[in-house]
Image: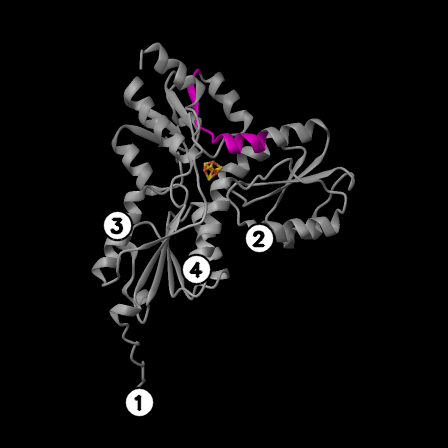
Amino acid sequence: MSIDLGNPRVISEEEKAVLLASPRGYCAGVDRAVITVEQALELYGAPIYVRKEIVHNKHVVGDLRERGAIFVNELDEVPSGATVVFSAHGVAPTVHTDAAARGLKTIDATCPLVTKVHLEARRFALQDYDILLIGHAGHEEVEGTMGEAPEHTQLVEGPADVANLVVRDPAKVVWLSQTTLSVDETMETVAALRTRFPEMIDPPSDDICYATQNRQLAVKEISEDTDLVIVVGSGNSSNSVRLVEVALEAGARDAHRVDDASELQDAWFEGVGSVAVTSGASVPEKLVEGVLAALTERGYPSPQIVHSADESLIFALPKELRRDLKAAGR
Ligand code: SF4
């Protein structure tokens, strides 16, 4: 018996197009965290210890490792007296306490927008609210935020969790969220929470950060009716993984996440005319350039940039590092 596999449609040069999302790639918090480790290496010399991946991108981590950064999971892997950088995702207060007890010099590269959520959690806990934190179990940011008020905080991963929640006073409930979630999915979870707890209050301002929101908006703009969306980003990068989901929900016929151009697969391009490209908030632009070069090799034209938001935010380096840079006359 022969099986007819069919012939993939041949795409003419005229039908091929590449859309490139803007904004994409590095956000202000990632930029600051990476520069923090680079400057610490220059100022204090290698090795510099970093608790967890400084940002969720394997190329960035690999590059810093080559330059003398040592990534550890927990502080007990750091020799006493050494310098340790806390990642952009933030840490629980117990981590600061442990570091002080072990005599470690710390540089806190937590993104200020994650710190903002920590401060909200602390404030609502002081006011004795039950905090419903929407986020992904096991994500470092969630562990750090929950650590601010463990007695007051419950994790909500999605609408399915809502029925099982137990709060002390339904009139004193607030929801907060991880900074890198899908805006649309989070709103579905909030709606389910609101049905169960009508008096629940909202965070004082958006917890899902500007960079996450802008990259989701940008991927929506390039996904509608597009044959294939390529998202550059690592598998443990929450915001990169969300971009694939958002692309498919926005109408892309297919979407894949790749760490770099080497992961592009021939089968994805069969019969594909329009390709759109974007990248997560922890992705260096050279990786996007690599994907665009691979598209050129496959006969696709230069990209057309689709601009959907302006970004100009820059964060100052952590104060401990600024102080030491200044003392060193840099
Ligand atoms: S994705 Fe948002 S919260 Fe995370 S580091 Fe970037 S700006 Fe900060």
* Residue in front for this viewpoint, 93 or 118: 118
Mark-to-mark CA distance, 2 and 3: 31 Å
**How far apart are the two marked residues, 4 and 3, measured between alpha carbons?**
20 Å
Find residue 265 and report its horizontal and vertical position in percent.
29, 62
Count of numbered tags: 4
Spatial CA distance of label 4 from label 2 is: 18 Å
Mark earlier in primary sequence (1, 4): 1
Say which amino acid is labelled 2. Glu
Q: Which amino acid does label 3 sit on?
A: Gly
Q: Mark 1 points at which residue?
A: 1
Looking at the rendering, in which quadrant would you find the N terminus?
Answer: bottom left
Callout 1 touching callout 3 (CB < 8 Å)? no
**Proximity of marks 4 and 2: CB atoms separated by less than 8 Å:** no
Between residue 186 and residue 162, name the one nearer to us.
Answer: 186
* Res 31 visible: yes
Q: Does the magenta stretch include residue 275?
A: no
Label 2 sits on residue:
185
Q: Which of marks 1 and 3 is in front?
A: 3
Return the residue at label 3: 290
Report the magenta residues as a range. Answer: 103-118
First of labels 2, 3 by sequence position: 2
Q: Which residue is drawn at 43% across and 60% down?
A: 223
